[in-house]
Image (cartoon, rainbow, N blue to C red):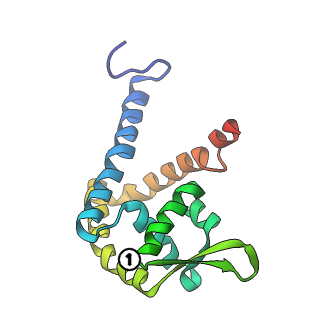
Amino acid sequence: MTTSELPGLSREETDTWMALIGTTMWLPAALDLQLQRDAGISHFEYGVMSALVHQPKQTMRMKELARATNSALSRLSRVADRLTAQGWVERRPDPDDGRVTLAVLTREGRRKVAAATPGHIATVRSLVFDQLPPDRVPELGTMLAKVVTAAGPDGACSSRLK
């Protein structure tokens, strides 16, 4: 077996798999580095606040926010604690169902996201979109959406793990 082949995968599949693994390792690290350096927040913290800023009233149920950020509720809860300590997020009981907790982006949180977004977008553009021919971006999006659907919380992988 050569170094570019894995058992059961063709050479092309192995090369593609290794590129995908490299992307899933290096891209989040690069995004985290930029956001930590420029805004003092992690990529995941930015993702949480960004998900909230795009919602009506900048509010989501914690369980829905966990799903939107591809996170376990326990991880989101720890991050929400940090964001709350910074004054960027508040947690409140849902007035429609007191058993449910809402995450609410504060005015300070909106300011933090607004300040962090230009640098983040520039980094995303540099690392991802500047590396692709513009006419191939929709194709990549379609392919990645299929992988996320298959591996995500409702996908085939998760159903096999239950």
Please state the horizontal and vertical placement of residue 82, each as a whole percent of the image: 44, 67
Query: Image check: 103 left or right of 141?
Result: right
Among the 4 quarters of the image, the one containing residue 103: bottom right
- Residue located beneath label 1 in the image: 113
Please state the horizontal and vertical placement of residue 2, each as a whole percent of the image: 33, 15
Q: Quadrant of the N terminus?
A: top left
In the displayed orientation, state which residue is furthest to the top.
1
The residue drawn where x is 60% and y is 45% is 150
The residue drawn where x is 66% and y is 41% is 156
Please state the horizontal and vertical placement of residue 52, each as a whole percent of the image: 51, 75
Query: Is 95 in front, or is 13?
Result: 95
Q: Is residue 36 above or below residue 142?
A: below
Q: Is residue 86 above or below residue 132?
A: below
Residue 55: in sight, yes or no? Answer: yes
The residue drawn where x is 36% and y is 44% is 25
Q: Quadrant of the C terminus?
A: top right
